[in-house]
């Protein structure tokens, strides 16, 4: 119960603190530069120069402390030893290049990068197009979208009931093996089946991300001007041609956005691997490898940070692409 | 498309069926978990969840009595007993593990030395021998039994009280609510400044926010943990609230700024002309008008924090009292791989709250996604 009051207390303090800051600082500013009297114009101008920074202050503080500073701190740690006491130059990175687990993680991440965004976008597009004009389309969409609300860990449990293995001939309690056995095949330990086990982990993420892709692409499909479609139909285009030659080209921009967004999720994928295989049996990925070096056994912050920086470097191109796009929209 | 669809009703059918299959494929995994969470603990181990509603077939063995239990009847030594438990029916039986259903109920099997076993339909067995039984342990009789399907809410009672999930539920709630409310406030002010105030560096700051959207939070874990330790915050709720606030801010500012930019300029300009201060404009005009965007972000942040495992593991700690629900689930998957009913029920409880939020506020979630689809995870 005291926990409950602690939470309520924090909300109150947090909310009150924020309001007090914004209201109080504005009030003080208006006192120092009152917007009336002889210097009213001058005062308003001065106050308006300062006010944005009052509004932005807490946000800038948080962003700097929780996102910007850590990037530089990680950079610093990545060129120091395990405890951060001695400068070691690029040796952590050199070690990474030679480490088998790191190479395995890079290779796996690369496969994840190819498979998951492609399949999520494909299924998302398919779902968006199929449910578009159906009477029960919205219910269908909700159900496909639903996994989005489920945690990666919860999804891990859910898929355990699909991938579970029992000895051949026994009653299979995993759905996939039950189907395989019913069709006359041998049940498999899907999660230890190198290298296909990676694919079975990826399916979990595709299952989660498809709904996201569907929602975005569905909106884009609806935004296509009707005239272009009608004109194509009048010219005798088949439904396939309408879809691939008229609709898809018009939503290429949105497909790119979906693709990059899923890509970022994939680069950071951690929980699914963490709870389902913990990187064993050739399924290691960068985020989980980093977790291993930072929190398991004797932590090595140098190596862990180096892996984090590699991750950061991998998202940077997308970051730049996003910024450029956002800037173009502003203009 | 309507015109075409009208002409080709075959196509309409194909679309309906394809869509249905797709939806089914996406729903089945979750459905499996829901059904499993109501199953009996023994049945969940012996049959798939899709068989939950049909009688449960199971195989096992029973040991007969030993020589001490034998009685003499008509010149034979006889051991009697039953192979069934309450509520079970006998489908078949056998004397070897490989063939647990070699004999029909009522049949008699020879097992050497003149020994004979009969298992009747009601489960009573009768083992006879012309010479006294001398074995110390009973013979094994293998049985294939059927039991009525059993669905129960017992798992929920057990998990919520005994397994510590109630505590984890409270922990999760304690983490989630402040971590959802506080960033909204901070972001709303910042977003207003970025959207409607003129100042040098505005474009740069906006670009920075877009850039920070994709920073992998793995980068931040160690530096922040050290920072928290140095500041004396350490591991605990305060730390995790601050961390989630920091990590959530870029998306919050980005979503809210994009929404606020689209608000009608005239309303804000005329309020300024009427002498309203920026703070008044923000509170009386911007905040109420931005409700949909605020709701969108609130749902995002709620789902994200509720479902998070990594930040909680790092900033809150891993003792029994500190675990959030995802942490408990992770432990269950590792250590109690065999207790499927506990795992299924715990998992369903942990996803129930986000699912309710999801279905209740889907409209805002979709709107937020459409506005902020640059962000990932």
Image (cartoon, grey):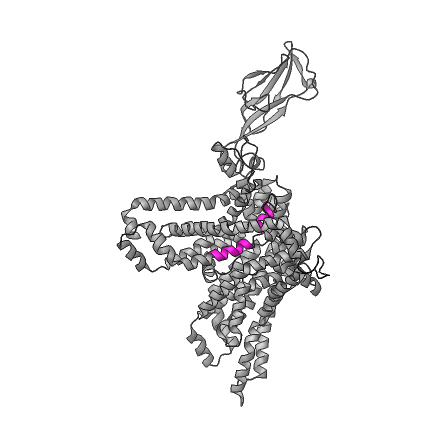
Q: List x then y, in percent, for residue A85.
A: 73, 61
Q: How many marks?
A: 0
Is B346 or B223 nearer to us in this picture?
Answer: B223
Q: Quadrant of the N terminus of chain A?
A: bottom right
Q: List x then y, in percent, for residue B78.
A: 64, 15
Is A269 one of the magenta-colored residues?
A: yes
Question: Can the viewer see residue B350 in this picture?
Answer: no
Residue found 42% across the figure and 46% down from its top:
B22
Question: Can the viewer see residue B26 in this picture?
Answer: yes
Could you tell me what secondary structure mostly forms the magenta stretch? helix
Picture layout, residue A176 above or below residue B115:
below
Residue found 50% across the figure and 44% down from its top:
B29
Is A44 or A307 nearer to us in this picture?
Answer: A307
Residue found 63% across the figure and 46% down from its top:
B331
Residue with the most extreme top position: B75
Q: Quadrant of the C terminus of chain A?
A: bottom left
- Residue interval drawn in magenta: A259-283
Image quadrant where residue B132 sits? top right
Residue with the most extreme bottom position: A38
Picture layout, residue B250 above or below residue B144:
below
Residue with the most extreme right position: A85
Q: List x then y, in percent, for residue B231.
A: 69, 65
Is B240 or B222 nearer to us in this picture?
Answer: B222
Q: List x then y, in percent, for residue B337.
A: 61, 41
Is A10 one of the magenta-colored residues?
A: no
């Amino acid at each position: 119960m005291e926990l409950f009051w602690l939470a309520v207390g924090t909300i109150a303090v947090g909310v009150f603190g924020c309001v007090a800051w914004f209201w109080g600082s504005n009030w003080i500013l208006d006192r120092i530069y009152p917007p009336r009297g002889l210097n009213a114009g001058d005062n308003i101008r001065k106050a308006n120069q300062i006010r944005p920074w009052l509004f932005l202050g807490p946000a800038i503080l948080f962003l700097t402390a929780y996102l910007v500073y850590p990037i530089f701190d990680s950079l610093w740690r990545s060129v120091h030893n395990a405890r951060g006491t001695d400068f070691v130059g690029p040796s952590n990175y050199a070690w990474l290049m030679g480490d088998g687990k790191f190479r395995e993680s890079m290779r796996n991440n690369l496969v994840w990068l190819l498979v998951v965004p492609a399949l999520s976008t494909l299924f998302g597009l398919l779902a968006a197009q199929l449910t578009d004009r159906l009477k029960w389309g919205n219910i269908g969409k909700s159900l496909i979208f639903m996994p989005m609300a489920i945690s990666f860990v919860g999804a891990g449990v859910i898929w355990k009931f699909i991938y579970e293995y029992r000895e051949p001939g026994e009653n299979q309690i995993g759905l996939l093996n039950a189907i395989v056995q019913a069709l006359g095949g041998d049940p498999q330990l899907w999660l230890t089946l190198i290298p296909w086990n990676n694919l079975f982990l990826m399916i979990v993420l595709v299952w989660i991300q498809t709904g996201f892709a569907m929602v975005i692409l569905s909106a884009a499909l609806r935004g296509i001007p009707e005239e272009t479609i009608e004109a194509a139909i009048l010219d005798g285009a088949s439904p396939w041609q309408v879809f691939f030659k008229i609709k898809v080209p018009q939503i290429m921009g949105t497909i790119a956005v979906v693709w990059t967004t899923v890509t970022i999720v994939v680069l950071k994928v951690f929980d699914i691997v963490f709870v389902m295989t913990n990187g064993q049996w050739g399924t290691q990925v960068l985020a989980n490898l980093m977790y291993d070096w930072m929190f398991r056994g004797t932590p090595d912050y140098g190596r862990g940070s180096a892996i984090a920086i590699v991750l950061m470097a991998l998202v940077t191109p997308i970051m730049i692409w996003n910024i450029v796009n956002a800037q173009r929209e502003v203009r | 498309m309507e015109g075409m669809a009208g002409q080709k009703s075959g196509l309409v059918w194909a679309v309906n069926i394809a869509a249905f299959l797709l939806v089914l494929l996406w729903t089945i995994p979750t459905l499996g978990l829901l059904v499993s969470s109501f199953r009996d603990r023994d049945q969940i181990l012996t049959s798939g969840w899709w068989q939950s509603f049909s009688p449960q077939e199971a195989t096992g063995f029973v040991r007969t009595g030993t020589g001490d239990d034998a009685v003499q009847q008509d010149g034979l030594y006889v051991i009697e007993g039953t192979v069934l438990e309450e509520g079970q029916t006998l489908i078949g039986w056998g004397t070897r593990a490989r063939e647990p259903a070699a004999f029909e109920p009522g049949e008699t099997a020879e097992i050497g030395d003149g020994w004979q076993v009969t298992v009747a339909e009601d489960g009573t067995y009768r083992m006879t021998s012309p010479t006294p039984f001398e074995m110390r342990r009973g013979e094994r009789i293998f049985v294939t039994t059927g039991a009525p399907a059993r669905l129960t809410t017992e798992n929920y009672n057990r998990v919520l009280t005994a397994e510590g999930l109630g505590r984890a539920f409270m922990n999760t709630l304690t983490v989630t609510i402040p971590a959802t409310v506080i960033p909204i406030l901070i972001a709303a002010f910042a977003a207003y400044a970025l959207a409607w105030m003129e100042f040098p560096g505005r474009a740069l700051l906006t670009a920075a926010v877009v850039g920070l959207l994709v920073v992998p939070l793995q980068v931040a874990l160690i530096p922040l943990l050290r920072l928290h330790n140095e500041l004396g915050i350490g591991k605990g709720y305060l730390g995790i609230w601050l961390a989630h606030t920091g990590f959530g801010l870029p998306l919050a500012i980005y979503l809210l700024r994009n929404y606020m930019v689209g608000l009608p300029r005239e309303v804000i300009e005329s309020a300024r002309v009427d002498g309203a201060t920026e703070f008044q404009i923000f509170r009386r005009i911007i905040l109420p008008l931005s409700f949909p965007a605020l709701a969108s972000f609130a749902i995002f942040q709620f789902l994200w924090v509720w479902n998070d495992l990594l930040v909680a593991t790092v900033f809150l700690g891993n003792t029994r009292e500190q675990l959030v629900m995802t942490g408990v689930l992770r432990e269950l998957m590792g250590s109690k791989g065999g207790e499927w009913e506990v795992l299924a029920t715990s998992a369903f409880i942990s996803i129930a709250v986000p699912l309710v939020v999801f279905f209740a506020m889907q409209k805002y979630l979709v709107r937020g996604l459409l506005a902020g689809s640059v962000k990932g995870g």
